[in-house]
Image: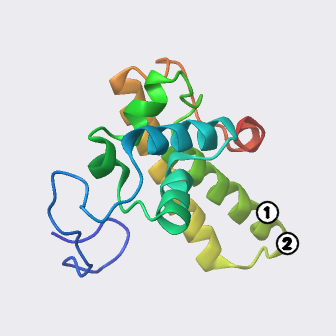
Amino acid sequence: MARMHARKKGKASSTRPYRNQAPEWLTHDKKFISKKVEELRRQGQSTAMIGVILRDQYGVPNVKEALGTKMATIVDDLNLKPKYPEDLVNLVKQASNLRKHLEENKKDLHGKRGLQLIESKIRRLVKYYKKKGIFAPDWKYDPQKAGLLF
């Protein structure tokens, strides 16, 4: 099946090796890693950024393998869950940056098409989150207010 917003087919990317537990060369214990996750989340880092920091600075290849639970579960248990889902926040930031670009470059037709594609992804995500009960049924994405919310 083809991609949604590109004419490409297939999946050409690297895959992680299959593992159920932490690798034996991992030097940090579970308590240290969970404490680091809490510390970084309290500093305001996103879960994706926490994973990158743990990988690059502390040599933790995967938090789920090291701790046995997902990082989102750990963040939920600590009551540090963000107000809005991370994927939606990233898409809204991307759309607002592109909107600023289009104010200066009004003839950028490729940028306008990109904005349409990003906003359709946002609408699809909002629809999913409404169905799952994360957002209220009357919650609506407004591009002018969205830059202020996130």
Which percent across, then down, holds residue 51?
Answer: 48, 55
Against 101, is 9 above or below? below
> At 58% across and 52% down in the image, what residue appears?
90
The local crowd at label 1, few if under 14, some if 14 to 19, many if 20 or more residues have their Cα within 10 Å, is few
16 displayed left or right of 108: left
Which percent across, then down, holds residue 94?
Answer: 63, 59
Amino acid tagged 2: Glu
Against 95, is 67 above or below? above
Residue 72 is tagged as none
Amino acid tagged 1: Lys
- Classify mark 2: helix, strand or loop: helix
- Closest to the observer, 10 or 119: 10
> At 19% across and 51% down in the image, what residue appears?
21
Quarter of the C terminus within the rendering: top right
131 displayed left or right of 89: left
Say if residue 123 shows up in the picture: no
Q: Would you identify the image quadrant in which residue 23 lies?
A: bottom left
- Classify mark 1: helix, strand or loop: helix
Q: Would you identify the image quadrant in which residue 40 lies?
A: top right
- Judging by the rendered image, the residue that carries numbered circle 1 is 100
Residue 104 is tagged as 2
Quarter of the N terminus within the rendering: bottom left
Q: Is the C-beta separation of discs 1 and 2 under 8 Å?
A: yes
Q: CA distance from mark 1 to mark 2?
A: 7 Å
Say if residue 74 shows up in the picture: yes
97 displayed left or right of 62: right
- Closest to the observer, 57 or 50: 57
